[in-house]
Image (spheres, helix red, strand yellow):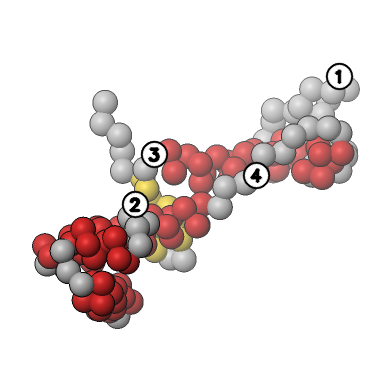
Amino acid sequence: MESKQRYININGEQIAVSEEDYLNYKRPIWAERKRREREIRCRDIKGNRCMKDCRLCDKQRDGGNLSLDKFAEDGYEIADLIDITEIVADKMLKEALRKAVAELTDNERKIIDVAFQGKSERDTATELGIPRKTFVYRRDKIVDKLRKILFE
């Protein structure tokens, strides 16, 4: 079964996301909408929720709003909310960086691949077979080139 391409609207821009990211973004929104709908539904004498059209009903449900603080006070564990905006921004930045790295020459890509493996400059330069100062100069030039591609 083919999965449908999902999009999230962030600051007026449609961002393509995976099914999982889409659901992680939408579920809290859907849950909040459903909670608000349930909150305003009136109840019959037995306490059952009314299933009639609320716009036509002259009754409102008694009771206050639910809050996360109240759940926490009652001993329920509240999971941290996922900030989908950060996830999408990270994903967009990674994709832009992937495209920028694709614009580098093979030699530049090799230097960048080796440069960010957590080794010392001396070990990295030795691995590439060039002097340390030459490695540092080339790495800095490549990083500047990537900045220009990404941010200009």
Q: Is residue 83 visible?
A: yes
Quarter holding the N terminus? top left
Between 146 and 139, the one nearer to me in the picture: 139
Task: Give the labeled residue for mark 3.
Answer: 19
Badge 1 amino acid: Lys
First of labels 4, 2 by sequence position: 2
Amino acid at pointer 3 = Glu
Element under label 4?
Answer: loop
Q: Is residue 4 left or right of residue 74?
A: left
**Image marks 4 and 2: residues in contact by CB distance under 8 Å:** no
Residue 137: image x %, image y %? 25, 78
Residue 121 found in image quarter: bottom left
Residue 147 location, x and y as percent?
31, 75
Q: Dots 3 and 4: beta carbons under 8 Å?
A: no
* Residue ID at (83%, 32%): 75
Q: Which residue is mark 2?
A: 16
How far apart marks 2 and 3 lie (CA) works out to: 10 Å
Visible in this render: residue 94?
no
| Image position of 134 with respect to 41: above or below | below
Q: Which residue is mark 4?
A: 80
Question: How far apart in space, not on screen, are marks 3 and 1 (Cα)?
Answer: 41 Å
**Which residue appears at 18% of the width and 62% of the height?**
128
Query: Which sits earlier in the primary sequence, circle 3 or circle 1?
Result: 3
Whether residues under marks 4 and 1 lie with C-beta atoms below 8 angstroms apart, the answer is no
Q: Which residue is mark 1?
A: 46
Q: Secondary structure at mark 3?
A: helix
- What is the CA distance from the residue labelled 2 to the residue labelled 1? 47 Å
Label 3 Cα neighbours within 10 Å, binned few <14 / some 14-19 / many ≥20: some
